[in-house]
Image (cartoon, helix red, strand yellow):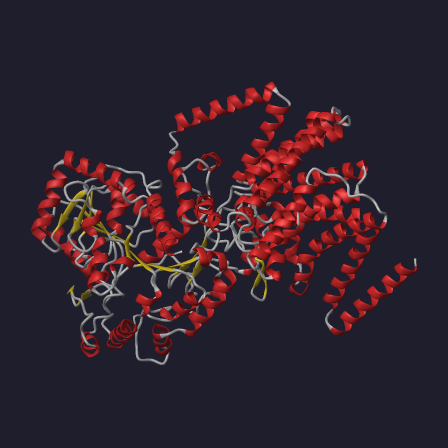
Amino acid sequence: MFLLRAYVVLCFLIVGVLAVFTSPLMALGALMGCVFLGLAILHPLSILGFLALYFPLEPFLMKFVPDELFVLIRFAPEVLLYLIVGIAIAHHIARRRAIPPSPINLPFVLFLATLFASTIINLVEPSVALVGIRQIVRFMLVFFAVLFLCPSKQFIRQLTIFLLFLVGLEAVLGVSQFVIGEPLDAFLFPSEGRFLGEITLAPNAFHFWDPGSRVFATLGRYDRLGTFLAFFLLLAIGALYEIKKPTLSRDVLILLLVGLPALALTYSRSGWFGFLMGFLVMAWWLKRDRRVRVAALSFAIIIGGYLALSGLAVRSLVDTPAQPIAERFFEAFSYERWAGEYYGVGRLFWIVNTPLHVIPTAPLFGHGPGQFGGGAVSALRNTRVYDELRLPFGIAGTEGYVDNNWLSIWGETGTIGLVLYLWMLGALLHYALRVWREAKDPAVRALALGFVGALCAFGINAFLAISMKILSVHKYYADRDGASHYQLEVNRLLEARGHEVIPFGMKTEETLPSPWSEFFLSSVETRHPSWSLRAFKTVGRMLYSREARRQLHTLVHVAAPDVAHLHNIYTQISPSIFPVLRRHEIPTVMTVHDYHLVAPNYMLWSHGRVEDLSRSGIARATLSRFHKGSFAASFLQAFVFKLHKRLRLYERGVDRFICPSTFVKDVMQRAGYAGDVLVVVPHFVETKDKRPVYDGDGSVLFVGRFTEEKGVLFVLELARALPDVRFVLAGDGPLWNEVERQSFHLENVRLTGWADRSKLRELYQAASLVLVPSLWPEVFGLVALEGMAYGKPVLASRMGGLPEVVLDQKTGRVLPAGSVSVWKRAIRELLADESRRMLYAKNARQDAEVRFSPTRHIADLLEVFASVL
């Protein structure tokens, strides 16, 4: 009693000191710590039960913890766990009791010895080794805490009931998310990152899927909820088989009726397949339940019938935000998904490369705890082993995190450690089977049977997961132009494959919502150049932006991306970001959208003709007013180009340049860029939402900006030469008034103005031909590709990358730019020859589906990323 009173007085003294010298919140945290510490000493089992119920709720509850208390509360449960184990061992020693026997005592001791031997052999720093060992063994300690505390059957029964009630609550929350959607998602989702200096306590999080489509309840991630539900639903099925009580059977059936739909709605394949494996082991193998065998065979027949009747292309399935549940299931067997995992440095990459490159360099004892996998390496950003072996830093997107699975343990503890770990799992499985066969108590048999299923699920769960972090940098984060649209579409496809995309750009009125927008830059004005004071900010941004460097440094520190994918950064962001990326050792890939890297006139167009001003002096370029018809804009553009070119900023800052066409690659090589850093990856078109209409109403369609280089005035010349052919012009731009004036007396010309996606769909489907009469060397030709996707023959200029998109005499015609007579004859011939037009149309659609598919593009893009990691 004296010690208890002294402890209470000491606690109040500590709380009082903290309240006076720090803050009331710290005092409150200390008071809570004292209460839990006292309970851990007096009633350790009650703390053990509390932790079992608290851990599933922790991700949600931590949202509401102030920053001052976050570190304390984040690690307090783990400290309590260690304390409980220590108290239990101390009680045994004090009472001179023997160590309770268990099937894993010997392999666990040997496993600990292997960890310490690996630490010594690899000269791992003690602090790093301690963090790594903690990451591996912390949950093993739960087993020994229960073993030493010897809880009564009544305690285990009550705790099991509470846990199954919590499972029901999580399942109800999950189903509610599916019904309610975004409001409940936003309330439950823990999105804010927390950091302690350089150490990540809780990373920034966001979900790419549609609200309500993947449920996660209070666990913060859909895969965590899937694993949680799978394990405990297997325990519930064990109770259903072994305990023959009508009321209990009813309650378990209710739990399964709610829990199984919630498990399905998590979209967690690791949870699905883990549950299926555990259930089949329990019901098919152990219980020999004929009903389950018939159901399993029926399920297999249904799957086969669905594949046969639906025509689902399993090979090409990839993850998408609004993916149907059937596609999610079959995607596990998709070649494209596995290819994406390998080239995107996902789980498959490490399944292949861990035994090939990691284990041979340290086969017996591994590379040491905290050196290869698990959260410890990720939190500490410990790249030593990865740097030595020249491997990318962990599973892409979760730096150093090859997960706490077989690969992580194998790499850190070697083959000896992995064998001992498997020995522990095998011993537990064997012991659980023996208890299930020999126990007389139905409740014990139920728990043992459920535990067997859960262990089987654990084996499956340890291999399934993916992720990648890609920093996507572009001046706009909005659908403003072709480059912006491409960036958004690529980001969507990468996120659909399970990768995390972190955008970085300017804040404008059109900027799309993003959890990373707080790191975006202030906007600068470039559309109306002048010599005004306001222009000085633009000039500074073009030359070197301290704001861009500062903001990106903060973003990279928080997000820790694996690779940077750059788009147009020239004027609004500047090369000032390259030192930040180099400092953080982030490989950089840049997609080339224009000719900014080879000439100040980044379209190679000036005063109505193709012209390369790369070798022109600054004075001559300024006097030519090549850029926006302005002396000021032309001077700045030429000066900045010359400066950056002289300093070779892009050549030094970018590891790979992605060229949309061979033509662009050749231009860049002639400008002095090394051929080995130039990779050709053509753009893509999504054909799923574009229904082809191979015949049309006889009209000819032009889509694009109304500018001279796009050939819009040339289309009007064609309209005058072909008065019996209807021309439809969709777009807007600087020449709108001129186009409107010239077309006023042309009855065969219709101007639609700017058209949104739905309007463009109508125009494409109605047309018989699509014209791309560009007078400048197009980098690629997305309009041509769009027309092909809708099943239209395309007539394109022999300029830039267009001949690589449109195949002459196969998917359309490739014609000399600006030749009215040649274009007139080609249009007449195709409109008159229906069979040839239909052949071109079908070839065009097929070419768009095969050569320019999103799947192929993303696979090529991920391969480029992998080449620089």
Quadrant of residue 724 within the rendered picture: top left
Residue 249 against residue 760 in the figure, above or below: above
Q: In front here: 393 or 238?
A: 393
Q: In front here: 51 or 359?
A: 359
> What residue is shown at x 57% (from left), y 36% (from top)?
274
> What residue is shown at x 21% (from left), y 65% (from top)?
671
Q: In front here: 750 or 633?
A: 633
537 relative to 132 in the view: left or right: left
> Picture coordinates of residue 132 (x, y %)?
60, 55
> What residue is shown at x 51% (from left), y 24% (from top)?
299
| Outermost residue toward the left in this view | 821
659 relative to 119 in the view: left or right: left
> Picture coordinates of residue 131 (x, y %)?
62, 57
| Outermost residue toward the right in this view | 1
The quadrant in which the C terminus is found is bottom left
Total numbered labels placed on residues in the image? 0
> Picture coordinates of residue 694 (x, y %)?
23, 37
Q: Is residue 236 visible?
A: no
Q: Is residue 214 visible?
A: yes
Q: In front here: 265 or 391?
A: 391
The quadrant in which the N terminus is found is bottom right
Quadrant of residue 769 within the rendered picture: top left
> Picture coordinates of residue 40 (x, y %)?
79, 53
